[in-house]
Image: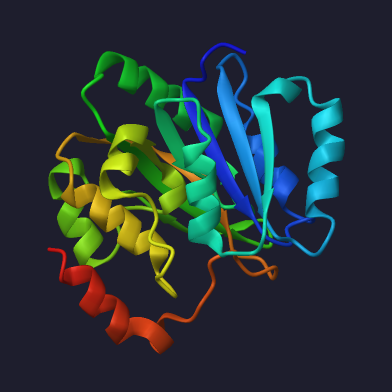
Amino acid sequence: MDKPVLSIVIPAYNREKTVLRAVRSAEVSNLPVEIIVVDDGSTDATTDVLKHYKKSASKSDSIVLLKQENQGAPAARNTGWKAANSDWVLFLDSDDELIPEFIHQAINTISENPQLEIVYGGYQIKKNDQIIRTSQAFPEENALAGVISSWLTHPSAILFKKSLIERIGGWDETQPAMQDFQFTLMASLNTEKIKRLRTYAVVVREDDYGRISDVRFEKFGKQINKQLFSAI
């Protein structure tokens, strides 16, 4: 495969029922996209499901399977982006689905604006196959304000320049919760080269399987706020 235009990192823990949905959505036709799935010490058949799928996939050379001992979602994402061969990285949760049109638009935007370091879109939330909420992302001129006040957009809806990830030191593996918020905040603090696309990027699933980074924020809120905003 030629150098990929995008590396899509999918951390997975006990996701035998959902991980292929994420992988299939990441297989963008006519684009050299690298899909890196990091199995974070699953105890179910996640790895077996992925290996079986890779054998029959039409673009099997674009799928990279990595496995590590269970260390949590931030560590799995760090393993993934460090293995990425593209200059751009998207972190896709293993129970979500990318919208292909967004990837095409994002790659075209990057090609036309090589100075960019963050490109992002909005997201849709589905439960039991019904859209229950949609969210357009904050405009780029208010990107940092959007992160601080609530949320820039869903983390799976953001492309990051790999050099920006390196500059901020990757994901903080010591945070007990809200790692997505911290990572997006740190990235936004370290660049002004941000572009919003007025399209939906990802379908976020709120089904009954749980999420790889699920931890109740209430338990750690004060600790996280103190650590995060000391950096501003």
Q: In which quadrant of the rendered view does residue 100 lie?
A: top right
Q: Is residue 220 left or right of residue 47?
A: left
Whole-percent x, y for residue 122 in the image:
39, 46
Residue 32: tell me if it is visible: yes
Quadrant of the frame with the C terminus? bottom left
Could you tell me how many numbered marks the image carries?
0
Whole-percent x, y for residue 153 in the image:
35, 52
Whole-percent x, y for residue 87 in the image:
39, 26
Way the structure is coloured: rainbow
Q: Is residue 211 left or right of residue 24?
A: left
Give the residue displayed 70% in from the left and 60% down from the top. 41
On screen, residue 132 above or below 138: below
Q: Is residue 66 left or right of residue 199?
A: right
Residue 132: tell me if it is visible: no
On screen, residue 222 above or below 113: below
Give the residue displayed 79% in from the left and 42% down from the top. 50
Give the residue displayed 46% in from the left and 39% down from the top. 90
Q: Is residue 150 left or right of residue 5?
A: left
Quadrant of the frame with the N terminus? top right
On screen, residue 6 above or below 191: above
Whole-percent x, y for residue 225 in the image:
25, 77
Name the residue at the bottom extreme: 219
Q: Nearer the viewer, residue 144 or 189?
A: 189
On screen, residue 8 above or below 30: below
Name the residue at the front extreme: 69
Give the residue displayed 21% in from the left and 45% down from the top. 139
